[in-house]
Image (tube, rainbow, N blue to C red):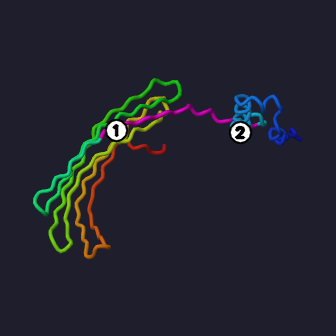
Amino acid sequence: AGTSVSILKSFAVPPRAVLEDRDLLRERLQTTVTSPSGLPGLQAPPPQPRQDQTQVGVYVQDQVRWGERVTAVLGARRDRARTQVGDQPRIEDYATSYRAGVIVDAGRGFSPYLSYSESFLPIGSLDFFSQPFKPQQGRQYEMGVKWQPREQTLVTLAVYDIREKNCQTND
């Protein structure tokens, strides 16, 4: 009643000719590990395409101090991301993101602050229709107060708002 199947044969030591040829051995191992389709009734998932991604960013930042109590930070970043998925055309994404912040030394260890920042995250994959995903982008607004009652202690209380778009979700 049914077909007898032995999977132990695939775990046998390969012949000497295969062991001496690295490419052939790698191919045999990948076939053994990724292809259960040799077993009756099982189908192997389709192979995933190779994905290569590189990202380069240039960042400029300046910190300015006014008097003895106020410090401001301004920054900008320019990113270039290149993604290659399988044999699809190469995808190039560019973005410029900014950040700014100011903190005031109000005395007695209290320092209120405000900050703003942007983010950019390229998504190195394709959707169901083989179209590239748009990069994820975000903005953050934050305000708070830092309190340092002693040199070893820092307490921060903050309120922030983060907004992101082009986020990936499961279907």
| Quarter of the rendering occupied by the N terminus | top right
> Few, some or many C-alpha atoms within 10 Å of disc 1 (few <14, some 14-19, many ≥20)?
few
Residue 86 counted in the magenta span = no
Q: Residue at x 16, y 52 (%)?
A: 64
Residue 55 counted in the magenta span = yes
Q: What is the number of callouts on the image?
A: 2
Vertical position of residue 47 compared to residue 154: above or below: above
Amino acid type, label 2: Val
Task: Out of 116 and 136, give the one closest to the viewer.
Answer: 116
Task: Out of 116 and 169, give the one closest to the viewer.
Answer: 116
User: Residue 89 at what x, y percent from top left?
Assistant: 45, 23
The quadrant in which residue 159 appears is: bottom left
Instruction: Say left or right for 154 vs 33.
Output: left
Q: Residue at x 40, y 38 (%)?
A: 122
| Residue matched to label 1 | 57
Q: Residue at x 28, y 48 (%)?
A: 139
Q: Secondary structure at mark 2?
A: helix
Vertical position of residue 67 compared to residue 153: above or below: above
Mark closer to the chain start, 1 or 2: 2
Q: Which label belongs to residue 38?
A: none
Please report the bounds of the magenta region as a residue range: 41-58
Q: CA distance from mark 1 to mark 2?
A: 38 Å
| Residue matched to label 2 | 33
Task: Out of 43 and 54, give the one closest to the viewer.
Answer: 54
